């Protein structure tokens, strides 16, 4: 029997949520803003009337929640809140963007259009691209004109992730992977650390639920012990701060579940061996012009009680990150012999660290500066503007070269989600480049002509080549020569979009000029022999000179790599190839036309809604029964089954979510699956014998391969085994772990 919906109660709840939002945004109102918000709410309410979310709740709850995040957690103003209320109206109803502009003005319409997905009918999303990628590109390009677009989209994504439990498993994997691939890194880049951490935790919750719940449980279980340690640690610091006249808040902040998981995975250690589960944060009330000196004075007080690790000092006050993050980090030794991270910052720095770009503008409007008459070393505005400038440059490259959406997303991620390196011009101006940037990247960042003529550089007064990798604090003086010209090898030495684009542009133009010159030489030479340059001749040019690209042949003629004598030889060969030419014209079967072998069905899985669909297990992650899995439709190999923690899963699900197919295991004990186990331990006589005895004799498991080696007393082995499922594998690992000398046993991906 269907549950009865209490419409009156729902309407009352809608009004309550709207009033809460209205109270939150009211302090930011200027003339006309109250009317704008009311009108946006009423428009959204009417547009989404009678529409419900997958959870069953009224759809209007979602835009109200997104608007609440925009004002409460990101600190944006009434225009952005109005756009947040309207953000799904164009996408999900018959209302168009022109109607939004007519009713709400150009600013609101631009924000709504920026977060609206492309209609499916607008583009044929073939196998060469995907609607997901096209939507990402549209949003990111719009962001370069108004950064509030991506902030509204982050609020939208955060609420969707918070309410993901009502979606199907396929949708959960798709949305969570998109979030990790695009949105969490953007939140980090904009300084929205709180949102970034929550997105990462929710990603883990829906892709590796058992791991998420285990870490969350262990954090709760150790909370009392952790709180006791924090209280004992901060007591002497609180007393010293009071004695020196500081007003400060001190608290311990646990690391996010995802960051703990990431550390466990990267360092290959269990939860119990992670000692920095939290950081101590000291937030000072400080006058603007004393911020830097106050933070360093507090650092001095902390190190009076606890010994610092000088290698772990991070000064992001003197050199803020490009997203505006400012803080002084140190790692000190606690009284129990464990390392503890201490973060020292002011109230302003803490708010910018939590709310990023929008908080920066709050303080900018208050005419906040480091000291009267002195500019900050690097403001958030400067860092963000530099980042958006790079996005605009990528947009220009996209428009000029006709990148497809997937190329654009890959280029965006490679350039804008990396850590930065801070370097200086000879005049002391700061330049921020992606980590790994070279002298050549720096030269092109200055100006394209400087890049084209770059011979090398002086780094801190020492000569270095164009492929020198820059380090923080380097002072760079580019050395140029008018005789210098780019070549294809330069593409190996650059990582920035700007440098790569400018080099490619130069090389393409050079090829174009030489190709035309070479073509003219060839036509003139062949004309003497009454031979016309047509498609048939071009085909034979490619065969004779073993080069698929005819432009390369023209260039080689222009550069005299192909001599006039070789052209004469080709002419003779061509005139004697009548029969061969006829043969060449006939269609030939190639490997590309060969039938693709059909993967053999395996009946241990239900793929989609049937057990009869053909599939194969992906060799990149080698899933076995019990693994959390999904199916993925490939172009040539049918359906492949991947683990959700496959190294390629996040990228595939983010770009091609429409190809995901539901896949679940059937309970079956008779089928075996090959897995590789990496075994590490201390070497001793008889260790291999004990291992093989446990595997083969005790557990009756077939061994497919063995590979062992030792170095300086450390034993490493790779063992290929046939197991039934995850529980079978886990039982084996537990037995092997009891063998004397075994330190770790890890499942190895191919």
Image (tube, grey):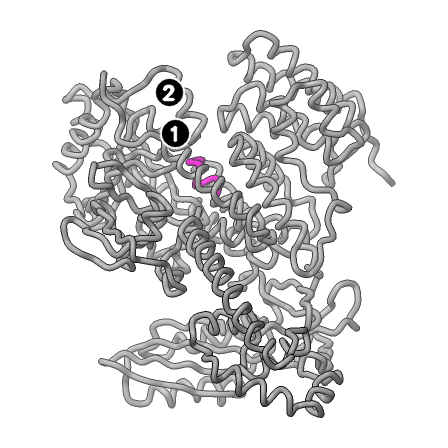
Graded by Cα atoms within 10 Å as few (under 14), some (14 to 19) or many (20 or more), the crowding at tag 2 reads some
Whole-number angstrom distance, CA of label 1 to CA of label 2: 9 Å
Foreground pick, 539 / 21? 539
Q: Where does residue 690 sit, x and y in percent of width and height?
A: 38, 87
> Magenta span covers which residues?
186-192
- Residue holding disc 1: 381
Q: Where does residue 599 sit, x and y in percent of width and height?
A: 70, 79
Q: Determine if residue 443 is in view.
A: yes
Are the residues tagged 1 and 2 within 8 Å (C-beta)?
yes
Foreground pick, 541 / 207? 541
Look at the numbered disc 1 and give the secondary structure of its residue.
Answer: helix
Q: Determine if residue 269 is in view.
A: no
Against 481, is 156 above or below? Answer: above
- Side of 538 where 386 appears, left or right: left
Q: In the rendered image, which quarter contains the N terminus?
A: top right
Of all residues, the one furthest to the front in this rendering is: 528
């Amino acid at each position: 029997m269907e549950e009865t919906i209490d419409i009156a109660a729902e309407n009352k709840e809608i009004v309550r949520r709207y009033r809460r939002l209205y109270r939150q945004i009211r302090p930011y109102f200027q003339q006309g803003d109250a009317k704008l918000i009311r009108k946006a709410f009423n428009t959204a309410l009417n547009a989404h009337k009678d529409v419900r979310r997958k959870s069953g709740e009224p759809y209007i709850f979602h835009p109200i929640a997104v608007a609440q995040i925009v004002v409460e957690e990101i600190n944006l103003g009434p225009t952005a809140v109005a756009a947040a209320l309207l953000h799904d109206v164009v996408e999900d109803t018959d209302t168009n963007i022109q109607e939004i502009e007519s009713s709400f003005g150009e600013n609101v319409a631009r924000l709504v259009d920026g977060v609206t997905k492309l209609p499916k009918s607008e583009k044929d999303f073939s196998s060469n691209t995907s609607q997901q990628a096209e939507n990402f590109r549209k949003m990111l390009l719009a962001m370069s004109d108004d950064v509030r677009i991506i902030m509204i989209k982050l609020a939208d994504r955060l609420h969707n992730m918070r309410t993901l439990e009502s979606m199907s498993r396929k949708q959960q994997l798709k949305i969570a992977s998109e979030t990790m691939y695009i949105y969490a890194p953007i939140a980090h880049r904009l300084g929205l650390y709180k949102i970034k951490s929550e997105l990462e935790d929710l990603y883990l919750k829906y892709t590796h639920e058992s791991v998420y719940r285990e870490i969350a449980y262990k954090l709760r279980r150790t909370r009392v012990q952790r709180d006791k340690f924090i209280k004992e640690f901060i007591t002497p610091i609180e007393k010293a701060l009071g004695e020196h006249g500081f007003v400060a808040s001190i608290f311990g902040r646990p690391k996010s579940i995802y960051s703990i998981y990431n550390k466990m995975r990267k360092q290959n250690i269990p939860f119990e061996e992670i000692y920095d589960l939290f950081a101590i944060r000291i937030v000072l009330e400080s006058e603007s012009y004393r911020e830097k000196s106050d933070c360093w004075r507090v650092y001095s007080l902390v190190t009076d009680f606890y010994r610092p690790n000088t290698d772990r000092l991070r000064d992001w006050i003197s050199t803020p990150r490009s997203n505006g993050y400012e803080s002084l980090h140190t790692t000190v030794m606690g009284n129990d012999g464990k390392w503890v991270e201490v973060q020292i910052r002011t109230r302003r720095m803490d708010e910018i660290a939590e709310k990023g770009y929008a908080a920066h503008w709050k303080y900018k409007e208050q005419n906040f500066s480091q000291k009267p008459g002195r500019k900050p070393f690097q403001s958030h505005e400067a860092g963000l503007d530099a980042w958006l400038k790079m996005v605009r440059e990528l947009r220009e490259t996209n428009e000029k070269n006709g990148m497809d959406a997937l190329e654009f997303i890959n280029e965006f991620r490679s350039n804008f989600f990396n850590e930065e390196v801070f370097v200086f011009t000879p005049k002391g101006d700061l330049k921020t480049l992606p980590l790994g940037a070279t002298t050549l990247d720096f030269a092109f960042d200055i100006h394209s002509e400087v890049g084209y003529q770059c011979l090398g550089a002086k780094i801190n007064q020492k000569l270095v080549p164009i492929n020198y990798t820059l380090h923080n604090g380097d002072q760079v003086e580019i050395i140029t020569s008018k005789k210098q010209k780019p070549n294809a090898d330069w593409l190996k030495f650059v990582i920035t979009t700007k440098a790569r684009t400018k080099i490619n542009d130069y090389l393409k133009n050079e090829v174009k000029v030489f190709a035309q010159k070479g073509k003219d030489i060839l036509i003139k030479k062949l004309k003497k022999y009454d031979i016309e340059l047509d498609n048939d001749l071009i085909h034979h040019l490619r065969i004779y000179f073993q080069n698929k690209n005819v432009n390369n042949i023209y260039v080689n003629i222009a550069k005299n790599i192909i001599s006039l004598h070789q052209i004469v030889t080709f002419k003779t060969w061509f005139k004697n190839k009548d029969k061969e030419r006829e043969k060449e014209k006939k269609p030939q079967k190639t490997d590309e036309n060969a039938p693709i072998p059909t993967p053999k069905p395996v009946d241990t899985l239900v793929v989609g809604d049937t057990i009869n669909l053909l599939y194969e297990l992906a060799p990149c992650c080698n899933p076995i029964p019990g693994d959390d899995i999904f199916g993925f439709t490939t172009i040539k190999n049918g359906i492949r089954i991947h683990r959700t923690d496959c190294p390629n899963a996040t990228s595939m699900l983010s770009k091609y979510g429409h190809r995901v197919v539901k896949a679940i295991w059937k309970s079956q004990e008779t089928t075996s699956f090959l897995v590789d186990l990496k075994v590490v331990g201390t070497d001793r006589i008889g260790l291999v014998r004990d291992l093989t005895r446990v595997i083969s004799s005790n557990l009756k498991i077939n061994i497919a391969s063995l590979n062992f080696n030792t170095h300086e007393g450390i034993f490493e082995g790779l063992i290929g085994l046939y197991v039934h499922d995850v529980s079978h594998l886990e039982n084996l690992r537990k037995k092997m772990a009891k063998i004397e000398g075994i330190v770790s046993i890890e499942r190895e991906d191919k």
